[in-house]
Image (cartoon, grey):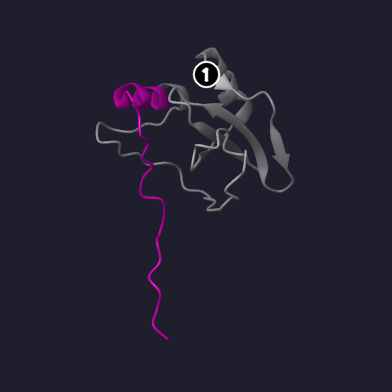
Amino acid sequence: MVPVERVIGIGGVFLRATDPAALGAWYREALGIDADEHGLWFPDAGPTVFAAFAHDTDYFGARTQQAMINFRVRDLDAMLAQLRRLGAEVVDDLQEMDGVGRFGWVTDPEGNRVELWQPA
């Protein structure tokens, strides 16, 4: 049997933006993504979910959004409060899944829905 080569992690997240500098600044300020001038970021190690959803899902927000970023956070309530203070559009409803964790959502300045996950 021929061995199968496998990916070893997420290598990047790339977003289209009408103002790339402003969107990058928002992610740094609002979510604390500590990326350098080239976008290089060293997130904490932890679980990553890779899942496909039905083409007509409303889970991503707008149906025109083809993918959604999910970021792990230590304290979901604190992160959502921070985002609200910054004037971000935060979804009021939270979701909790036993053994998985808690979820919340925010929309970035370009209209992309972003999921925030506090693992159990």
* Res. 21 in view: yes
**Residue in the image at 62% along x and 43% along y:** 57
Residue 97 is a magenta residue: no
The residue carrying mark 1 is 88
Residue 6: x %, y % from top left: 40, 66
Residue 95 sits above or below residue 46 on the image: above
In the displayed orientation, state which residue is furthest to the bottom: 1
| Residue type, numbered disc 1 | Ala
Residue 20 sits above or below residue 85 on the image: below
* Res. 73 in view: no
Residue 63: x %, y % from top left: 55, 37
**Residue in the image at 37% along x and 36% along y:** 15
**Residue in the image at 37% along x and 31% along y:** 34
Q: Residues within 10 Å of mark 1 (few under 14, many from 20)?
A: some
Stretch in magenta: 1-28
In the displayed orientation, state which residue is furthest to the right: 98
Q: Secondary structure at mark 1?
A: loop
The majority secondary structure of the magenta stretch comes to loop
**Residue in the image at 25% along x and 31% along y:** 37
Residue 47: x %, y % from top left: 53, 50
In-front residue for pair 11/18: 18
Residue 78 sits above or below residue 48 on the image: above
